[in-house]
Amino acid sequence: MKDPVTAITGITYDRDSIEHWIFTGRNTTCPVTKQPLPAGSDLTPNHTLRRLIQSWCTCRGIDRIPTPKPLLDRFHVIKLLRRLPSDRLLVLRRLETLASEHDRNRRHLLDAGVPQAMVGILLDSFDRREPHAPGLHEAVRVLHLVRAGPVEMKLTLQQHHHIDRIVQALTWLLEFSNNHVSYNAVSVMRLLFEETCSSSSSNNNNTATERLSPDFFEKIVGFLRAARATAADRDDHDHHDHRDRQQAVNSALTVMLRVSPLGKNRVAMVESGAVFELVELELAAAGSLTESRRTTELVLGVLFNLCCCAEGRAEFLRHRAGVAVVAKRLMKASSPAADERAVMILSLVCKFSGTNAVLQELLSVKAVAKLCVVLQSDAAAHLKEKVAEILRLYSGEEWKSNPCMDTCLLSRYQYQS
C-alpha cells in the first residue's frame, strides 16, 4: 500500500485500488465484508498504517513511500469555477489536468457542476458562431474527460432545458475542429443520447431524436468518412491516436444506433450516405478482428436498422461489397451479437429484396454456405430458426444445384415446419 485508507466498513485498502473498485468498477459493496458502500461515503486516511509502512521501508533500505498530497475536494473545484470569467484558459487547463489524473477527481468535478459550466461555454460560443473561441476546445475536452453519467447528464439537460441546442452546437463543432476536438465532441454526443434515449422523465428530451435535422446525419457520416481517411493515411504506430480514433468512431456509431430505429431518421441517414460509409468502415476494419469486434457489432446493428426500410436495402445492395462484408463477418467476429445482426440483415435482404441477382450474389460470396455453418454450430435456437426460414424461402433448384450447397441439408429445412 502507498496510501492506506479505511472504508466505513472498517476495512483498510490502498486508496487507488478501492477508488478504482468504486468509481471505475461502479461497485457498491465492500470487497471484504460485502456490506454496502454508499457512493458518497468517505475513505478515511489511515495515518498509523502509512507511518508503519514508511518505517518498514526505511529499515529495509527500500525507497520510502511519499506522504500523499492533500486531496482535491468539491470546494476547491467550486473556487476554480468562480475564476472562469477572469482566467478561463488557466482554469480550463487545470480542470483538464485534474480530470485526467484520477477517478476521485472526476467525481469531485461532477459534484461541483463542471459539466454544466462546460456546456455553458459550448453554447455561448455556438450562439456567437465562434468555433475558435478561447477555451471552447478545452471545455469540450473537459466534458469528455469527466465522463458524466446519466444522473449528471440529466442535471445538465435540466439546467439548459433542451438537448437540441447542445446537439446543434456539437454538430456545428464537427465542421470546424481538428481531429481530437471532433473525437471529444462525438464522445459527449454519445453521453447525451444515452441519457436522452434511456430517460422517460422529460417529453422534450424524449422527442429529441425526432427533431434531428438532415445536417446532423451529414456531419456524423462526414466524421466517419474523415476518421476512415485518417486511418488509411497513417500507419497506426501511434497507439494513443489509434485508440482515441477508434473510441470516437464507436461513439459516433453508438449515436447512430440509438437514433436509427425511428423511420424518419433511417431515411435521413440513408440519404446522407450512411450505408456506403458503414460498409467501407467494416471493410477497412476487416483485417483486425480482435480490435474491431465492438465496431463490427455497432456497424451491423446500424445496418440492420437501415435495412428495415426499402431505401436502406437498395443502398446496401448497390454497394458491391455489402453482402460480402456481412457474410464475411458471420461466424468470424467471435461475437454472438454480430452473428445475430448479420443473419437479420441477410434475412431482410432475402425476404424483401430477393431477386435472382441477389440470390446469385449470396451464393457467389458464400453467404449461403455460411448460413449452413450457423445451423451446424452451437448458435442460439432462435438464430438457427431464422437461418432455416431463409433456406426455406429460397431452396429451389438454383441453390440446390450449386456446388457449395448440401442438397440433403437444404431439403431438411425446406420441409421443416
Image (spheres, rainbow, N blue to C red):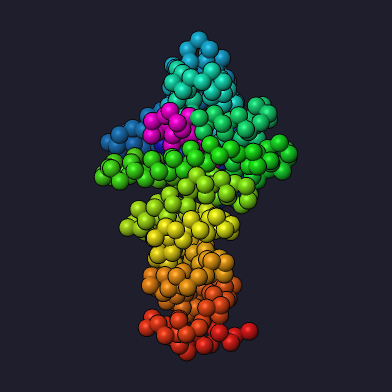
Relative to residue 220, is residue 356 depicted above or below? below
Q: Could you say where residue 110 lies in the image, as x and y percent from the top left?
A: 57, 30
Residue at 56% from the left image edge and 20% from the top image edge: 127
Q: Magenta includes 183?
A: yes
Residue at 43% from the left image edge and 49% from the top image edge: 277
Give the side of residue 323 with respect to residue 78, left or right. left
Q: Could you say where residue 237 lies in the image, as x and y percent from the top left?
A: 26, 44
Viewer can see residue 322: yes
Viewer can see residue 254: no
Quarter that holds the N terminus: top left
Residue at 42% from the left image edge and 55% from the top image edge: 279
Give the side of residue 190 with respect to residue 196, left or right. left
Q: Magenta includes 229?
A: no
Q: Nearer the viewer, residue 150 or 183?
A: 183
Residue at 42% from the left image edge and 29% from the top image edge: 177
The span picked out in magenta is 173-191
Q: Nearer the viewer, residue 324 or 334?
A: 324
